[in-house]
């Protein structure tokens, strides 16, 4: 009996050892190396044709809804800055509001906000913003037909830019002045009408 048990234990031991040996062989199986890729182009990729298509740029138009939303946001910010007396920031808000109104051809409102921005920027000695405001005011006055006032604003802005060495602003203002002159000259001239002489009037009567 004892001998039989010894034989059975030996058989089980050999079986377990064989199983562990089989598992160990699986762990150490070495697969062949993957061949190195020599062609690094994308010509063989399934979607490679997409890379040759022209990318179309999408331009989002500022609709009336977007303009109104921007107006509400800037107005809210301007009110906040004015309430807490952050006038320098409010000046930029007024300038931005004027730009939004210009896009909607609301010239009277744009002019009013530019004047408010200009008053603050002058008090703060913010010449950059003052120049921008003067250019905006000149644009509005030219649209309203007030060429004399528009010329004065542009002249003042040009002198300020020249004194401060703002070359880019000077070039922009010079172009605005040139455009203003061309627009003024392109307007139809009023016909000259002369009063009739007394002799002609008496003859006609």
Image (cartoon, rainbow, N blue to C red):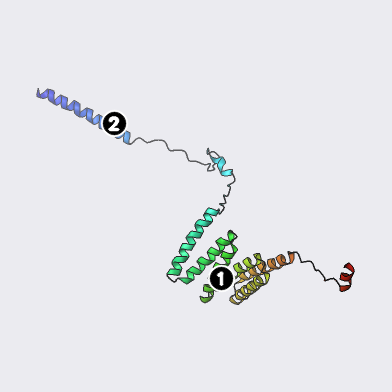
Q: Residue 139 location in percent, x, y? A: 63, 66
Q: Residue furthest front?
A: 205
Q: Residue furthest left?
A: 1
Crowd around label 2: few <14 · some 14–19 · many ≥20 (10 Å): few
- Image spot of residue 16 (x, y percent): 22, 30
Residue sitting nearer the eye, 46 or 69: 69
**Residue 40 image point, x, y percent:** 52, 43
Q: Which of the marked residues, 2 or 1, is nearer the chain's N terminus?
A: 2
Instruction: Report the front residue among 60 and 78.
Output: 78
Above or below, 189 against 125 in this view is above
Quarter placement of the N terminus: top left
Task: Locate residue 61, reporting x and y percent.
Answer: 57, 52
Q: What residue did someone put label 1 on?
A: 115
Residue located 22% across and 27% down the image: 15
Residue at mark 2 to residue at mark 1: CA–CA distance: 91 Å
Answer with left or right where residue 29 lies relative to residue 112.
left
Of residues 66 and 50, the one drawn nearer to the viewer in this rendering = 66
Name above or below for residue 13 compared with residue 196: above
Question: Which residue is disc 2 drawn over?
Answer: 22
Residue sitting at x 13%, y 22%: 4
- Residue at 58% in and 65% down: 108
Q: Which of the two residues, 203 or 37, is positioned nearer the viewer here? A: 203
User: Is residue 146 left or right of 114 when viewed as pictured?
Assistant: right
Left or right: residue 74 versus residue 194 is left
SS for tag 1? Answer: helix
194 relative to 100 in the view: left or right: right
């Amino acid at each position: 009996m004892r001998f039989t048990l010894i034989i059975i234990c030996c058989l089980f031991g050999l079986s377990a050892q064989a199983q562990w040996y089989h598992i160990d062989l699986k762990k150490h199986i070495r697969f062949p190396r993957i061949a190195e890729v020599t062609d690094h182009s994308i010509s063989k990729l399934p979607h490679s044709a997409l890379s040759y298509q022209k990318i179309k740029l999408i331009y989002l138009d500022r609709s009336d809804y977007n303009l109104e939303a921007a107006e509400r946001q800037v107005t809210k910010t301007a009110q906040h800055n004015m309430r807490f007396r952050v006038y320098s920031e409010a000046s930029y808000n007024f300038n931005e509001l004027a730009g939004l109104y210009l896009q909607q051809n609301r010239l009277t409102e744009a002019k009013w906000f530019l004047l408010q921005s200009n008053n603050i920027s002058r008090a703060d000695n913010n010449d950059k913003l003052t120049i921008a405001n003067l250019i905006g005011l000149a644009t509005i006055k030219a649209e309203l037909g007030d060429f004399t006032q528009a010329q004065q604003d542009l002249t003042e802005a040009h002198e300020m830019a020249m004194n401060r060495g703002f070359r880019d602003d000077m070039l922009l203002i010079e172009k605005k002045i040139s455009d203003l002159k061309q627009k003024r000259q392109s307007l139809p001239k009023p016909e000259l009408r002369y009063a009739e002489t007394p002799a002609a009037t008496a003859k006609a009567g």
